[in-house]
Image (cartoon, rainbow, N blue to C red):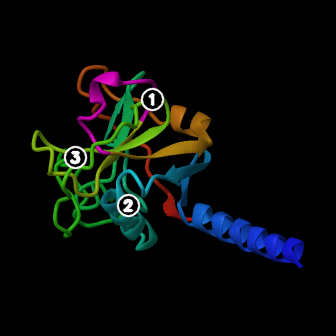
Amino acid sequence: MNKFIYLCVLFFYLINTHSIAKENVMILKLKYGEVEIELYPEKAPNHVKRFKELSDDGKYDNVVFHRVIDGFMAQTGDVKFGNSASPDFNISLAGTGGSELPNLKAEFSNIAHTRGILSAARSADPNSANSQFFICFQSAPHLDRQYSAFGKVIKGMEFIDMIKKGDPNSGAVSEPDKIISLRSK
């Protein structure tokens, strides 16, 4: 009888762990292929919640990678000026907008900005993150505990590497690549 109870508990634990883990995986579709991103709600709960909300509402669809610096990072997520399918699209303003939701308070953690880390883009004010984010191409330790890291690419980093790079100094991209879609798995 004890063995049966143990197996039942183990079964339900495994089912719940799998469904919890699955709800924190996002699929980013690029023209190069699909990218899987694992989110870290225990480290940055408000950033994860916002990212999932905007993603699942389709707000990131058609948003361009407006700032891409080879060997550093690819930045996107300006849902106001960076959506190439919107009448408000303006490549020269992309990177200055956000969503209509309030800015987020910083959620700094011990997550190192290594290859594949997703982190919230912001202005000089640490509490100004809104909808924009970036993905690191390589380690960027100078960003550690300065930006709110909230996820990591777990599959398809080779497709992130293919994103069109911008000017080596500013990162500004002419005819930038865009997010096709971004949704929970």
Q: CA distance from mark 3 to mark 2?
A: 16 Å
Residue 59 picture quarter: bottom left
Name the residue nearer the viewer: 3 or 33: 3
Q: Amino acid at mark 2?
A: Phe
Q: Which image quadrant: the C terminus?
A: bottom right
Q: Which residue is mark 2?
A: 51
Disc 3 vs disc 2: which is toward the camera? 2
Q: Which residue is found at the position 81% from the left and 77% from the top?
A: 5
Q: Secondary structure at mark 2?
A: helix
Q: Position of residue 179 (x, y in %)?
A: 46, 53
Q: Which image quadrant: the N terminus?
A: bottom right
Q: Which residue is found at the position 38% from the left and 51% from the top?
A: 43
State whether residue 113 appears in this view. yes
Q: Position of residue 21 (x, y in %)?
A: 60, 61
Contact (Cβ within 8 Å) of mark 1 with mark 2: no
Q: CA distance from mark 3 to mark 1?
A: 22 Å
Q: Earlier in the sequence, mark 1 or mark 2?
A: 2
Category of crowding for the residue at label 1, using alpha-carbon neighbours closer than 10 angstroms: few (below 14), some (14–19), many (at least 20) = some
Disc 1 vs disc 2: which is toward the camera? 1
Q: CA distance from mark 1 to mark 2?
A: 20 Å
Q: Which residue is mark 3?
A: 95
Q: Earlier in the sequence, mark 3 or mark 2?
A: 2
Q: Which residue is found at the position 88% from the left and 71% from the top?
A: 3
Q: Main secondary structure of the magenta part?
A: loop
In the rendered view, tell whether residue 169 sits above or below residue 122.
above
Q: Which residue is mark 1?
A: 114
Q: Position of residue 39 (x, y in %)?
A: 48, 54
Q: Amino acid at mark 3?
A: Gly
User: In the image, which disc is placed on residue 167?
Assistant: none
The part of the chain drawn in magenta is 136-148
